[in-house]
Image (tube, rainbow, N blue to C red):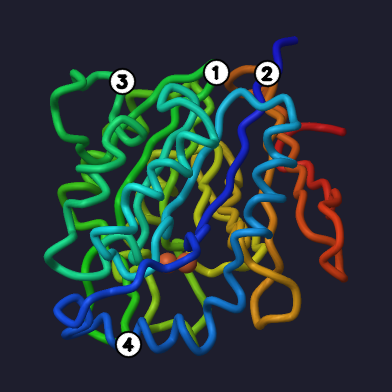
Amino acid sequence: MATFVLAHLSDPHLAPLPTPNAFELMGKRIGGYINWQQRRRHFHRADVLDRIVADLKAQAVDHIAVTGDLVNLSLAAEFAPARAFLARLGSAQDVTVVPGNHDTYVWSKRRHPQLHWADYMRGDALSPDVAPQFPFVRRRGPLALIGVTTAVPTPPFQATGRLGGAQLARLAALLDEHTGTFRVVLIHHPPQTKSAWRSRRLIDGDAFIAVLKQHGAELVLHGHEHCDLIRWFETPEGKVAAIGVPSASGTVGWKYDAAAYNLYVIEGSAGAWRCEMIARGLNDNGTRIVERRRVMLMGKE
Ligand SMILES: [Fe+2]
Ligand SMILES: [Fe+2]
């Protein structure tokens, strides 16, 4: 039986942060810059990300999904290094990206992910000279990778996401259209989160869950929380897992889970899927990348 291996990493928050000029720091970015200088730059480390990428590249992977927050403050100078990071992972044929809230941190850069990373987030049906549209679909092996955007500029001290009615309606139609494939929804924000994360939640998360419940999906992959999390949702075909992965650059000892990525080993066909998740990441003292756990999400051992 043919096996397809999908890797998922998220929230690299690429370092180093380019030095912003005074104009760029006006408005919302000043708070984010202070936060980066005082705290986040000690957590999101390039050397950790390098080790995660090296370990991932050593695996036999068919495709890589990246669920946003590639950059930090959406400075103009952050987008080209982020594109170089994607190229390090693989070609646009083999890597799929959806943006995160840090990729559209300010209003003036809300279109920058589509401008700079276009070929990594363009659906199969679009011609190469057309800007990416959401949601998009990319067929790879038995998979239909369906990418949505929740990345919207927000006021200071907020990191909420929003899909919007038009995107939700199109998502529902695409899930129906691709019934029978292994449908993987890629989204930056988690569908639900703890109450303390109210200022960072997906505003229309309940509507998103309602679409999953009615139209089905086989897997939902997200970032944003920087934690290793599995939540389950009912669909017409049974339970579906929404899985969050830690930041791919997060070091050990901060308030979030240390750097990791997940592999999904997928086999079978509609009604008889088998999907095992293998989580690989830093060990407890941050010295090595190890297999952290295996979870059978669909099918038998
Ligand atoms: Fe993030
Ligand atoms: Fe985020």
Q: Position of residue 156 (x, y in %)?
A: 26, 86
Residue farthest to the top? 1
Q: Residue at x 32, y 46 (%)?
A: 148
Query: Are there few (<14), some (14-19), or many (20+) residues within 10 Å of tag 4?
Result: few
Q: Which residue is mark 3?
A: 124
> Disc 1 residue type?
Pro
Q: For the C terminus, give its image quadrant.
A: top right
Residue 268 is tagged as 2
**In the visual, does 226 lie left or right of 294?**
left
Mark 1 residue's CB less than 8 Å from ligand 2: no
Name the N-terminal-most of marks 4 and 3. 3
Q: Nearer the viewer, mark 4 or mark 1?
A: 4
> Disc 4 residue type?
Phe
Q: Which residue is mark 1?
A: 142
Q: Which residue is mark 4?
A: 157
Query: Are there few (<14), some (14-19), or many (20+) residues within 10 Å of tag 3?
Result: few
Query: Are there few (<14), some (14-19), or many (20+) residues within 10 Å of tag 2?
Result: some
- The local secondary structure at tag 2 comes to loop
